[in-house]
Image (cartoon, helix red, strand yellow):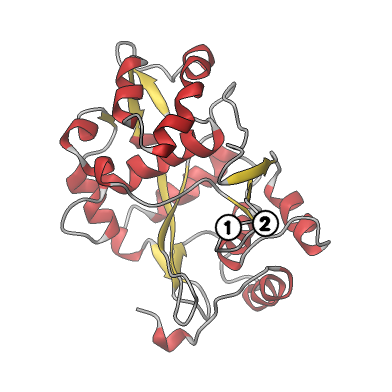
Amino acid sequence: MLRRNLSSAFVAGAYVFPGGAVDTADRSTATDALVDGLDDATASTWLGRAEGGLGFWVAAIRESFEEAGVLLARDAATRAGASPAVVERLVPARAAVAAGDRPFADVVRDGGLRLDAGCLRVFGHWITPSPAPRRYDTWFFVAPAPAGHAYVHDDSETIASTWVGPADALEQARQGDLELIYPTYRSVEALSRFETTHDLFRAVDEAWREPDQALAEVEGTRAWQVRLPGDDVGAEDRVADAIAHSTTSHRRPAREAG
């Protein structure tokens, strides 16, 4: 998890997952040609869009590289996961990619890699309601964490980083040691119900066997999260816990959800 810069205009100081806006280049033909494991038609269907859905996967991979030094990619020749040595060599390009001085596609191509879109799963969809000063329409993804990558903040948009298990993150938030906003808190809470990555992905993949039913509305919000075992158990207590211990709830009546 990454701590946002204290001078940020939105949720300064909060701990968040890597993320950011979808850039025009994330939907370019050049970038699409570097993606493995998913095509735009399938990605768009999962997100309920006519086209351009694959750009969200590319943005998630790019932002993870820029902000945390994690590159979800595969060797173009062998299709093996990107080696830590290759990622380490590419890490100095993080700042240039973030500043727009170097195309992400060039970095991927120069590393002899392809983006591993197939490793990401859609986990949630949160829309900041009005009258929040800044509004976001954000898709959350989960992916297995590759070993040996940097996992360190960029010292620009983010000023600290920590590797923390979901249950520990929740407890630190309850103690006031880790500042989480409501969407992050609810996402971490869902993750905390699984002992292993394998268990989590098995549940997520099972939910997406029926795409029309895969996402369920998050109580009292304009948000949807993948349906997971145990969602209905203690739901009211989980909502109360999140409201009490997250920085900003952004809550609105469920009837206004779209």
Which disc number belongs to residue 184? none
Q: Amino acid at mark 2?
A: Gly
Position of the C terminus, as image quadrant, is bottom left
- At horizontal 53% and vertical 27% (from top left) the residue drawn is 146
Earlier residue among tags 2 and 1 = 1
User: For mark 2, does the 10 Å Cα neighbourhood hold few (<14), some (14 to 19), or many (20 or more) residues?
Assistant: some
- The reply, left or right, for residue 103 in relation to residue 193 is left
Location of mark 1 (residue):
8
Residues at badges 2 and 1 in contact (C-beta under 8 Å)? yes
Local SS, label 2: loop
Helix, strand or loop status at disc 1: loop
Is 217 on the left or on the right of 100, as rendered? right
Dot label at residue 13: 2
Q: Is residue 219 visible?
A: yes
- The N terminus appears in which quarter of the rendering? top right
Residue 145 lies, in percent from the top left, at 55, 33
**At 73% across and 69% down in the image, what residue appears?**
245
Task: Tell me where residue 2 sits by quadrant.
Answer: top right
On the image, which quarter does residue 72 sit in?
top left
The vertical placement of 139 against 55, above or below, is: below
